[in-house]
Amino acid sequence: MTPTPIGSETEPRDSDSVGQRLADTSAVGADNPLRDPRDRRLPLIAGPCSMVMFGVTGDLAKKKLLPAIYDLANRGLLPPAFGLVGFGRREWSDDDFADYVEESVRAGARTPFVEDVFAQLRAGLRFVTGAFDDASAFERLTEVVGELDRTRGTGGNHAFYLSIPPSAFPDVCEQLANSGLNTPRDGSWRRVVIEKPFGHDLASARELNDVVEKVFRPEDVFRIDHYLGKETVQNILAFRFANQLFEPVWNANYVDHVQITMAEDIGIGSRAGYYDGIGTARDVIQNHLLQLLALTAMEEPVSFDAADLRTEKEKVFKAIELPADLAQHTARGQYVGGWQGGELVKGYLEEEGIPADSTTETFAAIRLDLATRRWAGVPFYLRAGKRLGRRVTEIAVVFRRAPFLPFRDTDTADLGQNAIVIRVQPDEGVTIRFGSKVPGTQMEVRDVTMDFAYGSSFTEESPEAYERLILDMLLGDPPLFPRQQEVELSWRILDPITEFWAQHMPPAPYRAGTWGPETAYEMLARDGRTWRRP
Ligand code: BG6
């Protein structure tokens, strides 16, 4: 009998064929009360498989990955033939692990806790105790995934999720190879998932990739940049290429400049060990912001297949030009203590685990230009930082001023520039800003906005980024995962900047709760522009 997905009583057609695209999605999980039958966003069900998670007790697994796996199960998108194996040092039994998973699911899942769904998931949970270089633990792991194949029908399909620091990759990859776990048999698959940071510069990214690709085929390596899993980020492509309205003005003839902002109100929390020495540019600009830039700037891909999409993104990365004078066109900051959200917060140098003389940046702003016909002369300003005014990620495409304004002798003194703002998060949606006549007898024009908000236009809730990415990986569907070429191209852009900063530009202080250091404002003022206040 065809297996039934977890959380559904309806048989999916051919669900045991990995990556099977269902033409009619209405049958999938239709009996699941949580599943809206009109929901065609995630119409595919993963085939039988098990996932081995390294770093399962880490923050990411606890807060995001385990809840996402449960949410997928709850939406009927995981097969019953699913196993999840935690691997770590803790002396845990399978039951201890299951309790831990339940706790994380109850605390972090997006969908309600359904006993039956969790019970079915729980039956496939296993734990293997061991260190990453412990050959005997990998022997036990081999037995456990074999047992899941036999007892739960996971079909020899195994995904290895490395939610661990890159320094642990060599050990894990070596042990996976020694135990033969990386080698698929009889038409099954083996995949590996790696989380950013993909190195800390071009050279280390290459080394890391060599370690992984010595053991897994390039097409079996899934690199996660969780921004690509966000609905609003995928919507950039829909917004641009599903509409006739915007693309004709999406170029240097009409666009003055683009501002991409990723502001966070949080500090570094307990992540000193990871963050110090890395800093904002490597943490989020090399990956999330450059991906946003690529999706905003790229040409229309021939199709949305992985190869076509990645090719267009890579063309953008290749066309990026750094400013000739990095001192004038980049800015770097570090937060000092201050009031934020009614709370007095510590400065970066006072955070636990941070050396008092650290020069790691917690704010970065960079001007990039693109040498293409579409974008010549249109600067892309990227900025990101911690402890800024509020949490917001947005892409603002700011248009040129109208060539002539026939309002000289009227009350219209100063009009802003038209803008299209893609609001990635929170308050997801799109805003268009334009001038409109103020009601009254005078010809006064003032800036107004027109809004699309996900919350009011759709009844469907957006899945979490990790739901989408984990499902795509289990389906073997790669478009949302950057390939190594993209990673290398983005380090090529960043390396000269971080090298320049290390030698010539210590971070300038900015008070927590503000929008970054003065140098960031000066950087835009030099170009006669100002940052938007998101
Ligand atoms: C991660 C960074 O990739 O993204 C973190 O390492 C950052 O420093 C996080 O806080 C932000 O993600 P999101 O989805 O909350 O914008």
Image (spheres, helix red, strand yellow):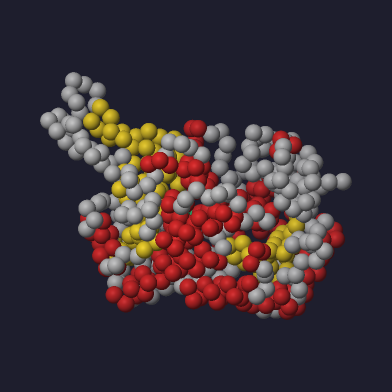
Q: On the image, which quarter does residue 385 sit in?
A: bottom left
Residue 510 sits above or below residue 178 on the image: above
The residue shown at (85%, 61%) is: 150
Name the residue furthest left: 409
Q: Is residue 153 left or right of residue 293?
A: right
Observer-nearest residue: 255 or 302?
302
Residue 209 sits above or below residue 189 on the image: below
Observer-nearest residue: 38 or 389?
38
Residue 311 in sight = yes
Residue 280 in sight = no
Name the residue furthest front: 373
Q: Position of residue 354 (x, y in %)?
A: 40, 72
Observer-nearest residue: 389 or 91?
389
Residue 168 sits above or below residue 253 on the image: below
Name the residue furthest right: 1
Q: Where is residue 100 in the image (x, y as percent from the top left)?
A: 66, 58
Q: Is residue 312 left or right of residue 391?
A: right
